[in-house]
Image: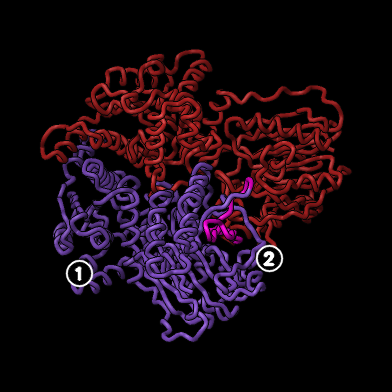
Chain colours: A red, B purple
Amino acid sequence: MRIALAQLNPTIGALEKNLEKVKKYYYLALENSADLVVFTELALIGYPPRDLLNYKSFIEQERALIISELMPLTDQPGTPILIGATHRQGDRLFNAALLLEKGEIKSIHLKTLLPFFDVFDETRYFSRFTDRKIEMIDSLPAAITVCEDIWNDLDYFPAPIYDLDPLEGLFDQGARLLINLSASPYHMGKHALREDMLPFLAKKYNTAIIYLNQLGANDELIFDGSSLVYNDRGELLYRASDVEEELIFVETDSLFRPAEIILPPDKDDIETLNRLLQLGIRDYMIKTGFKKAVLGLSGGIDSAVVAALAAEALGSENILGVMMPSPYSSDHSITDAVELAENLRINHRTIRIDQPLSTFTELLNDGKGPRQDIAEENLQARIRGNILMHISNREGYLTLATGNKSELAVGYCTLYGDMAGGLAVLADVRKMMVYELAEHINTVHGQKVIPQRIITKAPSAELRPNQKDEDSLPPYNILDSILELYLEKNLSAAQIIAKGHDEKTVQKVIHMVDSSEFKRRQAAPGLRISPNAFGSGRRMPVARGYE
Amino acid sequence: MRIALAQLNPTIGALEKNLEKVKKYYYLALENSADLVVFTELALIGYPPRDLLNYKSFIEQERALIISELMPLTDQPGTPILIGATHRQGDRLFNAALLLEKGEIKSIHLKTLLPFFDVFDETRYFSRFTDRKIEMIDSLPAAITVCEDIWNDLDYFPAPIYDLDPLEGLFDQGARLLINLSASPYHMGKHALREDMLPFLAKKYNTAIIYLNQLGANDELIFDGSSLVYNDRGELLYRASDVEEELIFVETDSLFRPAEIILPPDKDDIETLNRLLQLGIRDYMIKTGFKKAVLGLSGGIDSAVVAALAAEALGSENILGVMMPSPYSSDHSITDAVELAENLRINHRTIRIDQPLSTFTELLNDGKGPRQDIAEENLQARIRGNILMHISNREGYLTLATGNKSELAVGYCTLYGDMAGGLAVLADVRKMMVYELAEHINTVHGQKVIPQRIITKAPSAELRPNQKDEDSLPPYNILDSILELYLEKNLSAAQIIAKGHDEKTVQKVIHMVDSSEFKRRQAAPGLRISPNAFGSGRRMPVARGYE
């Protein structure tokens, strides 16, 4: 038997458009003699649909398209389809896998484990179903599962978060093939986790595994495909691309004999991050209807890395870098930015902000000169934000915000200023990792597209004379380490200090993080690459006591 | 027996400060001979704590304070305490009511129903517990419940959202008194719902009811107290304030005999809204550490209503209204705004934006004059946003955004411009209701504090010559009606048209709503007064297909 797996990139809510893609890949699979074509979780809707699921008419439309457009295909030309879709029973909505065969729904496999943590809200929309049955695929007893259903093995996970493991019941029924329709977003370390957990399951249950994952970025989340096929010995037979749509063919025979070639485990490294951030940019643009992006080029490392990523993602000709020097800008900030723009072959403009800045300061200082206080630092950032948004509004560019996670964490950024934009590319990338990315981008290009001085000079916001980030912040290597412990490991101040960090520094950093929640509440969506990003996965009160 | 109910206003996460308040009211209750003192859901933590619950050290600190500070009180002086708190069992966290007596935890009552819809995320943090026991309070068998536990009566609700009703089991055990510790936020219609559902329960189970609700606003949510006491005939004996902390005393004898005076049901009307929006402003300011608020005064109705609400909430002397006329401002926009400011006795300044506007337009139009396109309309709004944020940053004011829900819904507002601010007061108040509020405020004051012309003139953003809102939008009565059907009833375009609305108008409005999700994603927190506000209760993808 020949199973085709369609690793596709849907647009959330675009039922008709996603359907066209599903049909196109279905026919492509048939041309290649597939006996079954498999699609991902909520394939017509796209994942995560969030509150679109509250519109009953939307759910009804999804089912209507399955009935009118997909079910008939399985009668004529006649090859079955296994696809993720919602399923309603009375007042309850389920996240399901539907097996379509001979013009009908042959069987329905309802999801048991509904993720409710981090960015996930499935208990908000779906009911849980536990009475699961295996399904015969050709002559193979198969456990058909949806995403989270395979992620609660009580032997594998030291602290499983659900109280049951649906795989136990399915394998008790004698399943020999595990099919999982997923929409599982990337974060650093996820590749390694998948490629450790899945062979564990294969060996534990003596089962072959088909793991099919959604591709493509949606708002903050980057779905990295990387669909995987294991034989019943847990040997990796195939790994799909993490940035491209793919149609994968699996001969079921091959799943139950030793592998001819076993693929080595994936290295989830800085290049993975480089590729996936580009995918994040590209998809956000495509799915919000933009072709061109504008960003401020300060001569600093953050905007240099964003420019390089965007140029690669969208084509240099679609990127506009804007230099907006002020009286406080160093000479090298312009020359470095120009050199960068020329290396990347992106468009660039220079719009000095001296005039608007002095107009504002005169207006707001009763005709007197600049005071160089925080208000005027923010003002400069906001004037730049205004200019970028003006170019965006007038010329149809999407504005990319360039701030990194370290800044965003401690509030070292200006609301409506450098935080302005449609997408915050580095919002989940800590400063030390921005440096790594810069070095890596230069390595990939085989030349210093990001000028060396941008990488080596001391970081500065250049909002007052001779300003350096380290005047206000701990050195970034220390800051990043504290942020990791506080934001990603959820440790308390006392616990972080016990790990050897300086007490005053820890207190200061935590205070900065806690008291800048109001800025993050109004931040642009940021691409998520860590297990604990800001954005929809972090829900912190703004008005609260800090202790 | 004399039960004291403490309807308090906690600050989220401020464990020590909330504890001090709990202790203060405990002693006050004792001075008044209470035999039991009851506090609300998660009384030391404040509701909703959201992801603060992910910090294990935070949960441990809460329990440590209960053990070290509250339990000893119930030994000496010796009066028991019933208080909402978290409770950990192994890896699981529960939302609980703890009965503290004789220096110990006498009993623990774990919440069964965990709300997961709208603004609620309890399934994200808490486990569900179903094996509930009644508790003897003095000689009274009592059902001790936490908030949502009472909101799933299968006879009362046409479509209950949970599959079981914990009250059934508790009343099967013979409970005669229902005690509910709540943190239930206000929305329009909630008073009427509570005062209809609670007497229904009293009569159904022949039980007295003590309903104790949290007071005070936290971020978007306004908790309106309004704690209620019913006798076992379902007669309303007491209703607490919806804007003030209160210590309420209930003689249990009075719960089981006919009422001497039965209170009439509450009218949840425009004055309720007026009071609660003020509470929302005041608490957001207090809990974020601000005393003074600044806002732009355009001479329009939205900013007039916000100024009036803020003056009442914070004292006129703490409000600064800023007039920022442009070349497109009408004469009356200034005179009306000045008249308003003088009527309200708030501080006011005029800062014309002609200079920064012309500086920007020259800079951005290659030295040529204004083009009067959308980019320049947004620019004006952003210059005003810059000025307000500059005053905020330099002088320590919190900026109040003044846009209403109708504008925010259709994106008739400028990101980083009029949307800028720490709190969006009218973000959930539709335009027609803003008019009602204006009329009401004048009635309350017994004079036209909001000048009549502000109420009667045609709404205009005044961003180009002779602009009127109705050039771009349907009349507000029609717009508001469509918005209610689309946003609050979740109806589809077809369903709204079937209700008699013009097809083109409906399509246009829905398109405007859908395509401005990106603006709302970056909006300031807005006070919630409807069951379907924007903000944390609405989770819509930005990058998606529109169909």
Subunit bearing disc 1: B
Residue B447 vs residue B120: left or right?
Answer: left
Q: Which residue is mark 2?
A: A90
- Image coordinates of residue B301 in percent, x first then y, are 26, 62
- Image coordinates of residue B22 in percent, x first then y, are 41, 58
Subunit bearing disc 2: A
Q: Quadrant of the C terminus of chain B?
A: bottom right
Q: Is residue B115 magenta?
A: yes
Magenta segment, which residues? B90-118
Residue B476 vs residue A145: left or right?
Answer: left
Q: Which residue is mark 1?
A: B452
Q: Amino acid at mark 2?
A: Gly
Residue B161 vs residue B78: left or right?
Answer: right
Q: Amino acid at mark 1?
A: Gln
Q: Nearer the viewer, residue A478 or B101?
A: B101
- Image coordinates of residue B459 in percent, x first then y, are 27, 62
